[in-house]
Image: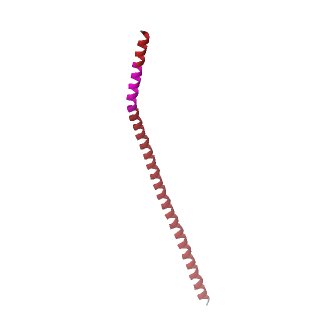
Amino acid sequence: MEYAKNAIVVRMEFVVLMKVIKCVYAIEVSQRRMENAENAIVVRMEFVVLMKVIKCVYAIEVSQRRMENAENVTAVPMVNAVLMTTIKCAHATGDSQK
């Protein structure tokens, strides 16, 4: 009986130990999965942020180019307008001096 009790206690301790080991293993695995998931999320987030930065920089550069192009396009009519205003002003000044 004592041996039987001891055997049951040993077996129960072994079962408890195995449950503890399984539990610890499960916790460690789940933590690793979480870490991997977090790393994956961080990498994905960094990639998303990087892509947003690239898109933002690209958009700024494109908008700057458009602005430069637009300035060049609007500069021509402005030069014409200033030139015409100057000519009109000079013409008016010439008329008034007569």
| Residue 32 image offset from top left, x and y in percent | 50, 64
Q: Residue furthest top?
A: 98
* Pick the front one: 47 or 15: 47
Residue 41 vs 28, above or below: the answer is above
Residue at 59% across, 88% down: 4
**Between 14 and 23, the one nearer to me in the picture:** 23
- Image color mode: secondary structure
**Residue lying farthest bottom?**
1
Numbered range of the magenta stretch = 72-87
Is 70 covered by the magenta stretch? no
Q: Can residue 76 be found in the magenta stretch?
A: yes
Placement of the C terminus among the 4 image quadrants:
top left
- Residue 86 occupies quadrant: top left
- Name the residue nearer the viewer: 12 or 59: 59
Question: What's the residue at 42%, 39% (across, down)?
Answer: 63
At 58% from the left edge and 81% from the top edge, which residue is drawn? 12
On the image, the x and y values in percent for residue 11 come to: 56, 82
91 left or right, relative to 7: left
Task: Say if 22 sits above or below 79 in the image.
Answer: below
Q: Residue 71: x percent and y percent?
A: 41, 32
| Residue 47 or residue 31, whichever sits in front | 47
Residue depicted at x 38% and y 32%? 73
Q: Magenta region, mostly helix, strand or loop?
A: helix
Picture quarter with the N terminus: bottom right
Counting from the top left corner in percent of width and height, residue 65 is at 39, 37
Q: In the picture shown, does residue 54 fall above or below 21?
A: above
Q: Is residue 78 above or below residue 35?
A: above
